Image (spheres, rainbow, N blue to C red):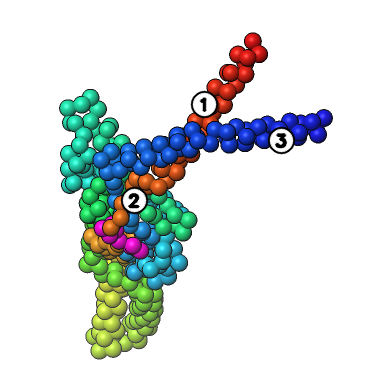
Amino acid sequence: MFQKARESSYLESTSLLVLAIRWIKPLCIVTILGALCALIFSGENFITPKFKSTVVLFPAATNSISKSIMQEHTSDKQDILAFGEEEQAEQMLQVLNSDEIREIIIRKYHLMQHYKIDSTQRYPMTALIGEFNDNISFQRTEFMSVKIDVMDADPEMAAMIANDIAALLDSMEAKIQRERALHALVIVENSYKEKVADINRKEDSLRYIRQHGVTDYRNQALIWNEEYAKSFSTYNNEIASLEVLQKYRDPNDSTIVNTKARIKGAEARLKSLQVKIDNLADFGGASISLNEELSLDRESLSKLKEQFDKLKVDAMQTLPYKFVVNKAMKAEKKSYPVRWLIVVITSLCAFILAFITLLAIDKAKEIRLKI
């Protein structure tokens, strides 16, 4: 069975070859005519030749100046000199395909007139965008770079458009990130101002407490309680001495007078210390709390200031978002149409179509003869 199938296939192939040899003259005539037509109709009179200019870019690994320069410890992904990876290349493609870049290029080079699109037709912008997409393309290469290809009848314009799109990439990405950085900067700035105002309020409260003699609660409490204990002990000793002296000496005796004076001095000292201790009791807790809060607030303020400075750099300064490997140059040779390819494909199609037509005619004759 399989042997018969192989023999049948062989016979059919041989038959087709015999037919091709038999019809060699008309097949050659049709193929040559097809080639001539392709050669003629692919000429400049029928197809406008186009020149291609290409820019090759590598995305940068990071676009944040603060992370790349101002941060002490940076990873390889934050290195200012590192090439980006697949994620950055995809982001770059999204920006390149943005409506804003397309609109800027259309306005700058008057592409509606350049592509000869009638602005009064029903959908002029759709036609313009279609022409734009046909002539300008962006793609990621196997090496994670991004390629910008521009085809145009004017080789100089093709190079200019490609280079301008590459330049617009930086401004677009800078605009997008600057807007975000400015919003973040406002938030951090407001937080910084609120923290400064809070610190000022607490320092005013602490200043009021210091005006009442409470400057260092812990040390003052230790010293003043110690002084109070000593003064109280002195007072009690002097009282005891006075009682003994009054029993044995004249009331006008100088020793008794001096003792009474020391007692009054001790009383005055105790009253003075009691006022200070009372102030400590009234304001000590608030003083400790405010000092601890101010310490934390100043640390937080320092971090906010550091964050504010970094965001300010990101918002006000920019780094290139790409590494340009190849700039677009004015092409010397056209890239479209590829005439030899058109001629080869047209000739092959003409040959196959002619062969199928002749085969159909031959089969039709066989059927008629059988009938």
In the rendered structure, which amino acid carries the disc numbered 3?
Answer: Tyr
| SS state under label 3 | helix
Q: Position of residue 101 (x, y in %)?
A: 26, 46
In the rendered structure, which amino acid carries the disc numbered 2?
Answer: Ser
186 vs 217: above or below: above
Instruction: Determine if the magenta segment contains residue 103.
Output: no
How many numbered tags mark residues here? 3
Q: Residues within 10 Å of mark 3 (few under 14, many from 20)?
A: few
**Residue in the picture at 45% in, 57% down:** 144
Q: Between disc 1 and disc 2, whose residue precedes?
A: 2
Q: Residue furthest right?
A: 1
Q: Which mark is residue 357?
A: 1
Q: Which mark is residue 164?
A: none
Residue 261 showing in the rendered view: yes
Residue 230: quarter of image: bottom left
**Residue in the picture at 23% in, 24% down:** 122
Residue 96 showing in the rendered view: no
Name the residue beneath numbered marker 3: 10
Q: Position of residue 284 (x, y in %)?
A: 34, 64
Task: Give the magenta-colored segment's residue range.
Answer: 323-331
Residue 6: quarter of image: top right
Q: Position of residue 85 (x, y in %)?
A: 45, 58
| SS state under label 2 | loop
**Disc 1 to disc 2, how far (Cα)?**
35 Å
Nearer to us: label 3 or label 2? 3
Name the residue beneath numbered marker 2: 335
Q: Between disc 3 and disc 1, whose residue precedes?
A: 3
